[in-house]
Structures are given as C-alpha cells and as structure tokens.
Image (cartoon, helix red, strand yellow):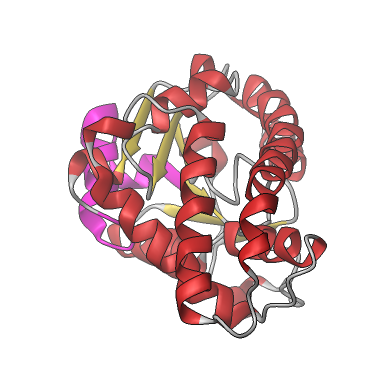
Amino acid sequence: MQISWNKLTTLLFDFGGTLDLPGAHWLDRFLGLYREAGLDLTREELDHAYAYATRRGYEAGEPIYGYGLRRLVDLLVTWQVDYLLEDLPLRVPPAIRAAAGTIAERFCAQSAAGFAQSRAALAALAPRFQIGVVSNFYGNLEPVLHEAGLLRFVKMAVDSSRVGAFKPDPAIFRAALTALDVRPQEAAMVGDSLNKDCAPARLLGLATVWLRPASIGYTQQVESGADLVVHNLQELVEICVGAD
C-alpha cells in the first residue's frame, strides 16, 4: 500500500539497528568487533552466544533498569564471552576476556555515531509527528534514550521487558498505540526487521517502513513486504517533508 503521510500523526521506531546505528543489527556489529579482536567466528557461532546473553539480559530485571548503554553492553559482552569459552573451548582462547572492554567500547562508539544521525532525523520529524519507540529491550530503554539525547523527541517508549511482551507479539504494538491514544491507521512503524517490526505492525493496520539493513541486497517494496523501503533515516525525513 502507498503511505498517505498527511493522514499519519504518529511514527513508531524500533531502537537497535534503527536509532542506534541505522541498518546495522547488533549481532553483525558484535561479530565484526570480535573478528577485529582476532576471534574468527562464524555468524552462527556468535548467534548462540548472542542469544544466550540477550536472554540473560531480559531475565536480569530491575537491577539493570537504570543502566546506560555502556554498562549494558559490558554485561552483554561478558555473558557472550562466558558462553563462547564454554561452547567453543578449542577455538576461543581465555585471552578473549582481555578484549571484552575494547569490544564494548567500540560498540558504544559506533552507537554514538548513529545517535547523532538519529537526533537530526527525529528533530526534523518531531514537529510534525508524535514519536514513539517500541523495542525488545532490557528494561533500561528510557535511560539509554536519555543518554543518547533522543528522549526529548520521544513522547513514549515501550520496553518489552517492562510490558512483558516481545516483538513480534502484537501486544507490544497495541501497548504503544494505547499509550499514545492513536489508531493503527494513523501510525507507521519504522524498523530494520521485516519479521519483528513490519509484519506484526502491518497485521494491526499500521503503515510500515523498512530500514533496509546494509547486508540485504534487494530494495523493492514488492520483495520486502513493507510499504516503504529506506536506506537511512534522512531518506525517511526527505520523503515525509516532501509529502507536505
């Protein structure tokens, strides 16, 4: 479907891979940083460690609700390394622990560059749309958004660990719509995942914008299943401004 921008009042954004470093999945970012540290992992090998750390983060609860990004990433990398050392003892040397701090530091430096792009985009969009963030996160989404300088543009942030619903469960999108007092046809979901962002939002009647990850080679809307495909947030801003 073609998005009728003049009928929309609300834009919902994913966080990881969308606002922190647009178009770059956290797993792929971590993979690149481990390889830079000298650990030649496959994506599948790291995916197991990544999923383990993510699950532990979701289960951590209130003790991490006040964490900023660096403290969170330090914890996630520690858990990833724990898993890798146990799962791949013949391939992963114990010395990788010494690189954990550098991996976390570089990850956060990448995010800082992405936040600068996102601040500019949200500053341009906020006068026209109310902005929401809907993310599978660890209970500390608002502190991270505040630290990044993004929270001032955001009317509402829905953190999966706080509401007990994780994308692609439609319940997390319903929670956002209810909190913003907006109907599905008045909102669009912007995210880097077709399965977790676009598909469930579309089922509820939201317009969908796919921020195409750099690793994906095709761009056609028909192929993607999203209403609109963009390569970066500035492209989205230009489309919205051009719709005035």
Q: Residue furthest bottom?
A: 90
Residue 90 x, y percent position in the rendering: 60, 85
Q: Quadrant of residue 110?
A: top right
Q: Is residue 236 left or right of residue 200?
A: right
Residue 112 x, y percent position in the rendering: 71, 32
Q: Residue at x 68, y 55 (%)?
A: 23
Q: Residue at x 27, y 31 (%)?
A: 63
Q: Residue furthest front?
A: 94
Q: Is residue 204 left or right of residue 79?
A: left
Q: Is residue 167 a member of the stretch shown in magenta?
A: yes
Q: Nearer the viewer, residue 17 or 26?
A: 26
Q: Is residue 146 left or right of residue 54?
A: right
Q: Residue at x 66, y 61 (%)?
A: 96
Q: Is residue 229 a member of the stretch shown in magenta?
A: no
Residue 169 x, y percent position in the rendering: 25, 61
Question: As displayed, is residue 47 above or below residue 134?
Answer: below
Q: Nearer the viewer, residue 54 or 187?
A: 54
Q: Which residues are magenta?
A: 166-188
| Residue 45 appears in the figure | yes
Q: Quadrant of residue 12?
A: top left
Q: Quadrant of residue 219?
A: bottom right
